[in-house]
Amino acid sequence: MHIADKMTAFEKRATVSLASIFALRMFGMFSILPVLALYAKALPGGDRPLLIGLALGIDGLAQALLQIPFGLLSDRIGRKKVIYLGLALFALGSFIAASGNDLYTIILGRLVQGTGAMAAAIIALTADLTREEHRSKAMATIGISIGATFGASMVLGPLLAEHIGVSGIFAMTGVLAIAAMAVVRFVVPDPVVSRVHADAETVPGQIRSVLRNPELQRLNFGIFSLHAAMRGMFVVIPLALVSVGGLPSASHWTVYLPVMAISFFAAVPAIIVAEKHAKMKQVFSGGVALVFLSTLAMALLLQNFVGLVAGLFGFFLAFNLLEATLPSLVSKIAPAGSKGTAIGVYNTFQFFGLFLGGAVGGYLAQHLNESAVFAFAAVLAAIWFLLAITMRAPPAVRTRLFHVDVTDAAQGRELAADLGRLSGVVEAVVIAEEGVAYLKVRMGEWDETGALQLMNRGT
């Protein structure tokens, strides 16, 4: 077995093109967040924060319900067909929202946008088009593109709204979705073979065991809480920047740009400490504590502009830190060979968080007050903090994938047993149907040479 050190040009092309599709779709979802509440105020129904919250969060409900089924559908009918379907639905929803003269039409458009739940199909296609040894690099590239798109959307959303209006942003999003279909057709390579990848896709038979894992459930509650807080905040934040800070909507980028840029780079050292020095639990718990403190500060200091911006910075510092460490924790805790299912369930909780965060945030703003939105987020963070500090310290391991030539399940079990006995190998699973060995290893300690010799045996 020869393990290449670099991705091929084919793999790079596949990774970059699929990351761009993800980014185009995410830009359309994110760029609306900092401007929708302000725009909705002038529409019929805009005096009801509950409707604004539903407009902000309803896409999450559709994605939560459909992202796993669409991923499974891509196994049956093909990845690209599902991606085309997802982009078409997303474009349709964007054009519906662009045509809306009231909040109800925008809610419908956002719901249809959410039905374009193609994320799982894109991840599966990425796995089809990359070798096992380089798949983590490809997934990391997609993750970075999503993070960068989120930050850019927060800054560009208010500027775009000033020049083309919120309906123009929706229409532009629809056009970008159509352009992404052309990228799928002409740039993204066609896979030679499509098959289920246990490291990247949900395997239905594994869902029950993943849901029964208490450590994974702590992380699922965490991503639910984080995204519920984030989506609920945008029912209030844009309005508060106007009423408290006196900032016209076109100038909101002057807050979002430094908050997003500084918080992004400030999170990097903590992420490095967590991974390189096996301090994941400490850094993770600290991030959750910061979510609690920042949301509590915004609840108490909502009428103080400096306090509001400071709380916003603290929240997004924690957000960037946790967005990076949560998937890593899922990978470390999930059983070898079940990572894809664990991530699929995790993403479902994330999308439900988006929906309930918007809906509950709107309800609280309408029936109590705006500070109650942040108080709700602080309560979720307090519960999450208790779960974080009582969790088991995650093992300091990395997942490594290798292609292996095994002819049947019995041979796979024998190879897995041999690999599991090697120094530094914490867990080994070989799935004969995929021809893949999944290893959890202590980096710097494991016997990679011995593992390669075992996997080369008989080839």
Image (spheres, helix red, strand yellow):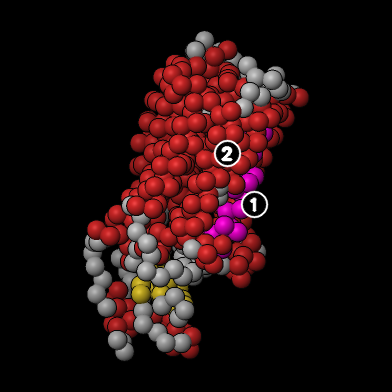
Q: Which residue is mark 1?
A: 65
Give the camera-side residue of 394 and 37: 37
Q: Point out the image quarter for the C terminus.
A: bottom left
Residue 169: x and y, percent?
49, 28
Quarter assignment of residue 97: top right
**Disc 1 + disc 2, Cβ < 8 Å:** no
Within-10-Å neighbours for mark 2: few <14, some 14–19, many 20+: many
Residue 75: x and y, percent?
52, 66
Q: Point out the image quarter for the N terminus.
A: bottom left
What amino acid is found at the position of numbered circle 1 in the picture? Leu
- In the displayed structure, 87 sits above or below 403; it is above
The answer to whether residue 226 is visible is no
Residue at 51% across / 56% down in the picture?
Answer: 82
Residue at 30% across / 54% down in the picture?
Answer: 13
Residue at 34% across / 66% down in the picture?
Answer: 131
What amino acid is found at the position of numbered circle 2 in the picture? Gly
Please report the bounds of the magenta region as a residue range.
Answer: 54-72
- In the displayed structure, 433 sits above or below 226; it is below
Residue 449: x and y, percent?
27, 77
Q: Which mark is residue 93?
A: 2
N-term-proximal mark, 1 vs 2: 1
Q: Nearer the viewer, mark 1 or mark 2?
A: 2
